[in-house]
Amino acid sequence: MNRPAPPPTDDELHAWVDGQLPADRHGAVEDALARDPAIAAKVAAWHTQRDALRRLHGELLDAPVPASLAHTLDRQLPRHARHGAWLRWGGMAAGLLVAFAAGWLGNAQWSAAPRAGAQLVRAPAVREFVHDASVAHAVYAPEKRHPVEVAASEQQHLVQWLSKRLDRPLKVPDLSTQGYLLVGGRLLPGETGARAQFMFENAAGERVTLYIGTLDAQAAGATASRETAFRFASEGPVPSFYWVDQGFGYAIAGKLPREVLLKLATLAYRDLS
């Protein structure tokens, strides 16, 4: 009698996400994905994290594995876990790549540039910017009649107006693949000048805002002003994902689950970068 194949382990699911799973285990993983919604959701989340990290670490994809890191893996990982674990430094197997992502997300420290991320933790200007984004969302998102100054029907005018006031070409990201459409936007004051807020809403009436503004380079820190970092923040009335690019700050804020904010922030980051 043929025994049924054992259920896939987390290591095998990681390998599936990374395209490294042996062919003889494909059937077991496919069956598990079809039968168990929890496993399917877990794998989908890993796919999202893996793709986002690859976009953020694209410059490392073709770099060879550092000799010191390979030596550490050889000493610390069992032989079966090392098999296929590192093909390239930027093309690591999903088991390691997603483990890093999950760990960072769990500690609210998902960063595209570790050195810049460490600087952001200490930068008061960035913390204030993120807090302001959260407060601005809490103030305007509940509004029924006047949530924005300029409605989405005048999007071209809205973008031109805010671009002029912030002295930087702006763009409205497309969040429609996640069900969020532009409501409109408004001009807001900030510590270093004008800031912009774009508001989006889904069919259920849930709203998310994109907060944009210049950060003082000296106050934010030289590293944060040069490099891009993408991080989660729970300070303030609502959580947000935010990043800093060449001294310009962006924050996606909303009273939404972290994984939903992550998807929306990833879309916005991709469009605005």
Image: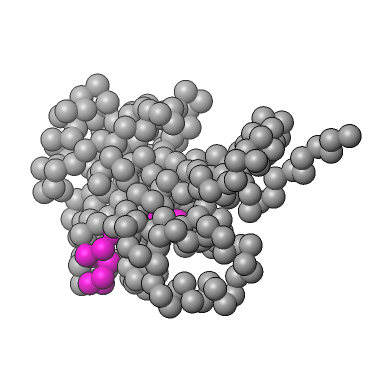
Identify the residue at image location x=33%, y=28%: 183
Identify the residue at image location x=19%, y=32%: 158
Identify the residue at image location x=33%, y=29%: 182
The quarter of the picture where residue 146 lies is: top left
- Give above or below for 49 relative to 111: above
Where does the N terminus fall, quadrant-wise? top right
The quarter of the picture where residue 222 lies is: bottom left
- Report x, y in % for residue 160: 13, 35
Q: Is residue 120 visible?
A: no
Identify the residue at image location x=43%, y=78%: 68
- Give above or below for 65 relative to 27: below
User: Which residues lie in the magenta part?
Assistant: 221-233
Along the viewing direction, whichever of 29 and 120 lies nearer the viewer: 29
Name, please, the residue furthest toward the right: 1
Taking the image as shown, residue 66 lies to the left or right of residue 195, namely right
Q: Is 53 colored magenta in this rendering?
A: no
Q: Is residue 59 visible?
A: yes
- Report x, y in % for residue 88: 40, 60
- Report x, y in % for residue 164: 10, 43
Along the viewing direction, whichever of 116 and 71 lies nearer the viewer: 71
Q: Is 228 colored magenta in this rendering?
A: yes
